[in-house]
Image (cartoon, rainbow, N blue to C red):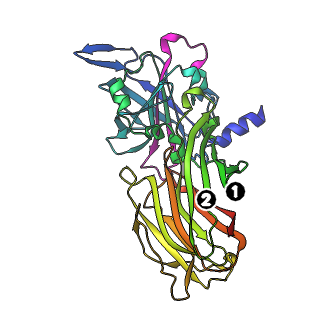
Amino acid sequence: MKKTISAMLSLCLCCSFLLVGNANAISSDLGNCLEIDLIAGEVKSAYVPDVNATGSNLVSGVEQAERALTRAVAIQVQTATYKDEAVTITGDVNGTSFAVSGEFCSVSDNENVVVFNATDKMGNFNVAYCAVERDIHDSGLYFKSITDGNTQSTDTVTKLYLQDKMATNTRDFTIIEILGNKFPEISQESISALPANHQLNLFWYAKIFAPVEKGVEEGTATTRAGNPNFTLLGYWYYNPYGMWYKHYVRYEQSCDIRDVTRNQTSSASANIKVTQKWVEAQNPNDSSSNTSMLSLSDIDITYKTMKYTAVQTQMALGQVKTAFSISTKFNYGIKLALDGLTIAPSMIVNITHGQDNCSTGTVYKPHTNTDGNYWRAAQASLPHGSGKLANVNHYFNVQWTYGAYTNSTYSDDAVIVFDYVIDNELDYTESQHRTDTRTIRVNIT
């Protein structure tokens, strides 16, 4: 028992005294507009100070009566209503008022979670999360006892998670969970109009907390005509308030360098493509079958030729997410390395700036190869500000022509290097750098 009390003291969770406005469910038909009072049952709240970087001490399932007090914090919810696909919640935390409102911006796969892009009009709080959820036995709840003995009459919960802008420690959270019996009806037109990445709004924890684990798994390479293809799986795991969430991005790297005839030209290409994204969660309402917040950015693809060969042209194509839209037209950076023709690829270390930007689909001729100097390596870059591979089927493809400058047959390894970052679309301070070097056997015939 002493150990239990000590553990709870270490969390420094402050109990909240709750004052609730109208606790009766009210719904009225105002023309075609249905107004719902989201308060139909118990309203639970807690003030949680000093939440750590991963959110592991924002522990759920511990009732306020069981918590040791460090200071009394009064949390009042005055109104919580839904109308015209928008939500409004008012109240105060220890006398500091909030007036939260926002419009519908996302829905979960199973349509049990409706998220709102809410802000505090008073300017006192950041809204970490605002949503209404049903089938709450399948939801991740801070107050787990909400579902204990719960009946279908109150099978909806409104979640409002706030961060105090005025506090000296912005890691202090106000958690409010409101039981209700009416779930907002969102039109199919509004759902169909959502952007492709709207479910990012579901992953509120990934905006605030760091993952507890991240990594990349590489599958067995497959070959086609001697050229390798690689499937990789990036994963980040989160564990806020005692729940686990696993974000995944699966992507492919392919290389294709064709053999070349003596004193002739041939082709080479490399491609990186996102093929699948999903989220596995402890609770079904928090899972997603088609998106996660992981994306690929800061991509450099470099082709290093083998001896007696050199790059003649380079072109890039792709579909990426830019700052404003999904686009197949974007600029990419070019870098080239100039070396003597017989130097081995492993000795090419100096990549020098060539043309800064080149439009996709435009062939760039780096050098005529007529003066004894040859471009032994060529790189195409998709810098952070230019675009990223954020959605399934986004890709970055680079194509080269290269020439063989010898009268003899020869076989050796050419190299293609994929250098990139797996990042969090919601928090750019969290990223994972990776370099994958692929070798391909090439023949001069």
In this rendering, the answer to whether 254 lies above or below 107 is: below
Image quadrant assignment for residue 310: bottom right
x and y percentages locating residue 81 in the rendered image: 35, 24
Tag 1: amino acid = Gly
In this view, the residue in front, 208 or 39, is 208
In this view, the residue in front, 279 or 430, is 279
Q: Residue furthest left?
A: 31
Q: Is residue 303 visible?
A: yes
In this rendering, the answer to whether 272 lies above or below 243 is: below
Which residue is under mark 2?
256
At numbered mark 1, what does the secondary structure look like: helix, strand or loop? loop
Question: Which residues are the magenta region?
Answer: 146-174
x and y percentages locating residue 148 in the rendered image: 61, 17
Q: Quadrant of the C terminus?
A: bottom right
- Compared across the picture, whether 212 is left or right of 86 comes to right
Which residue is under mark 1?
226
